[in-house]
Image (cartoon, rainbow, N blue to C red):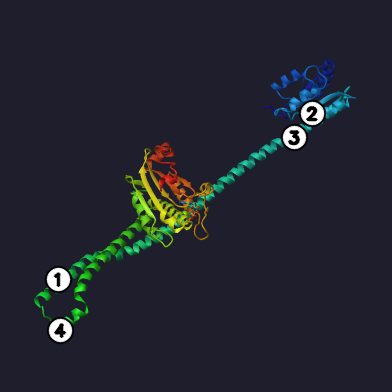
Amino acid sequence: MINSMDRSDIILIVDDNPANLGVLSDFLDDTGYEVWVAKSGYMALQRIEYALPDLILLDIMMPGMDGFEICSYLKNKAETCEIPVIFMTTLSDTESKVKGLNFGAVDYITKPFQQEEVLARIKLHLKLYKLMQQVAEQNQVLEERVQERTFKINQMMEELKKMQVQLIQNEKMSSLGQMVAGVAHEINNPINFIYGNLSPAEEYIENLLSLIGMYQVYYPEPYAEIKAYQEDIELEFLREDLIKLLSSMKVGATRILEIVKSLRIFSHFDEAEIKQVDIHEGIDSTLMILQNRLKAKPEHPRIEVIKEYGNLLEVECYPGQLNQVFMNLLSNAIDAIEEFSSKLSREEIQAHPGKIRIYTNLNNYDEVVIKIADNGMGMTEEVCSQMFNPFFTTKPIGKGTGMGLAISYSIVVDKHGGKLECNSKLNSGTEFVIKIPRNRDSINNNSRSYVQSDNSHQNSPASSVIQ
Ligand SMILES: Nc1ncnc2c1ncn2[C@@H]1O[C@H](COP(=O)(O)OP(=O)(O)OP(=O)(O)O)[C@@H](O)[C@H]1O
Ligand SMILES: [Mg+2]
């Protein structure tokens, strides 16, 4: 592009009168302008197609296209609308002057021409035109800068939001994980100790009872004092009850052992790195922790959990974090069922007991698919569109922080290269679908496979998932 400072300004004169053309072009040429001439409107437009002048001197009365037509054509075209047009009229033709200005001309000059006046007007309008161009260019630069900055600010805001989510996630994870792991660790030793001693204790007690039995056989008539004591302690009842008591202690201890094991699996506290694990163990341990919330309450019957586990083999993942996802999705499901129950009558609740269905499988893309569906409240489209946003909650203050799904999304998508999708219908239920590649290799080597969706399982309306 030629720099405007390096070249002379170009003036296009459009006039069908050769005498006028000659006078003007010679004079402007001598003044140092580059002059183009056109003898008709048609030729002028042809010339402009080829290259643009800096100013146009335009005669009004011409055969074919007249000056007004040309002017209106130029003003309606984006490339030419800014070029200043000066009409050439006769001194007495006031009507044409006004009309020309209305058509977008910047000025007029009158025939016969006063050379000094023509030159002054041309100079003025060229100057104005250039100033306008400069302003437009500066505006463009400014706009680009503003856009660039806005983009950067938006990027930074996104980063900041991500960081916040990450921080809260770490905090939530580590405080919950630490507590669970700490409690589990503290209980683990004593309960193992109790459980381990129960069997020998049972054996010793059986031995002692056998010994008492033998005494009774060989000394059927004990001293009166012994006889009185036997009756006092209800020896026969004690004998039967002690065995029952021991076996119920065993059941209780076994249960505590299971809970401790679940807590340890759930927290996976010391396992920050990726591991091959059985995902079902994680889901089961989460359910174990949530047992209390699933139990029958005065407000609703027990929430039934239907497990449809497929054969997942071992999955490469961050187990502690994935358990956090299960915890969030399952607690949300329980909340949604409880909220729905609170809106139903007692009879309606009996006819519509809360259910959570957990389905797992491997799909054709070697992705682990985990679906967690409930028949609770469901969501409106508006809630659906915002649920993954950090701090979005519909729960009362103090009940929900609105971070559960934001954290879960970041764990599934960012940490595991997977997907977290949701199908929900108001007053019918909700289904969350987690998909994560079974092996980390497939994230790097076969990124297409985990991006594609698996239509055979997806998009099933929540109502058909759980009845
Ligand atoms: N299974 C579900 N059924 C109906 N609504 C749901 C379900 N899961 C999530 N939601 C909606 O999405 C919102 C956001 O869920 P999210 O888990 O992020 O936050 P929260 O449960 O409100 O708070 P918390 O941070 O304690 O988990 C919920 O407030 C609820 O409105
Ligand atoms: Mg939640």
**Residue carrying label 2:** 103
**Contact flag, marks 4 and 1 (Cβ < 8 Å):** no
**Label at residue 224:** 4
Question: Quick one: 301 or 378, which is closer to the camera?
Answer: 301
Q: Is residue 221 left or right of residue 300?
A: left
Residue at the extreme left: 218
Q: Nearer the viewer, mark 2 or mark 4?
A: 4
Quarter of the N terminus within the rendering: top right
Question: Quick one: 258 or 378, which is closer to the camera?
Answer: 378
**Residue carrying label 1:** 210
Residue 329: percent from the left, percent from the top? 43, 52
Nearest to N terminus: mark 3 or mark 4: 3
Q: For residue 46, which quarter of the picture?
A: top right
Q: Disc 2 and disc 1: Cα gap in Å?
A: 122 Å
Q: Nearer the viewer, mark 3 or mark 4?
A: 4
Residue at the extreme top: 18
Query: Where 217 falls versus 299 (above or below)?
Result: below
Question: Quick one: 197 or 222, which is closer to the camera?
Answer: 222
Q: Nearer the viewer, mark 3 or mark 2?
A: 2
Count of marks placed on residues? 4
**Residue carrying label 3:** 132
Q: Give the secondary structure at mark 4.
A: helix
Nearest to N terminus: mark 2 or mark 4: 2
The local crowd at label 2, few if under 14, some if 14 to 19, many if 20 or more residues have their Cα within 10 Å, is: some
Nearest to N terminus: mark 2 or mark 1: 2
**Contact flag, marks 3 and 1 (Cβ < 8 Å):** no
Q: Amino acid at mark 2?
A: Phe
Q: Give the secondary structure at mark 3.
A: helix
Q: Give the secondary structure at mark 1.
A: helix
Q: Amino acid at mark 1?
A: Ser
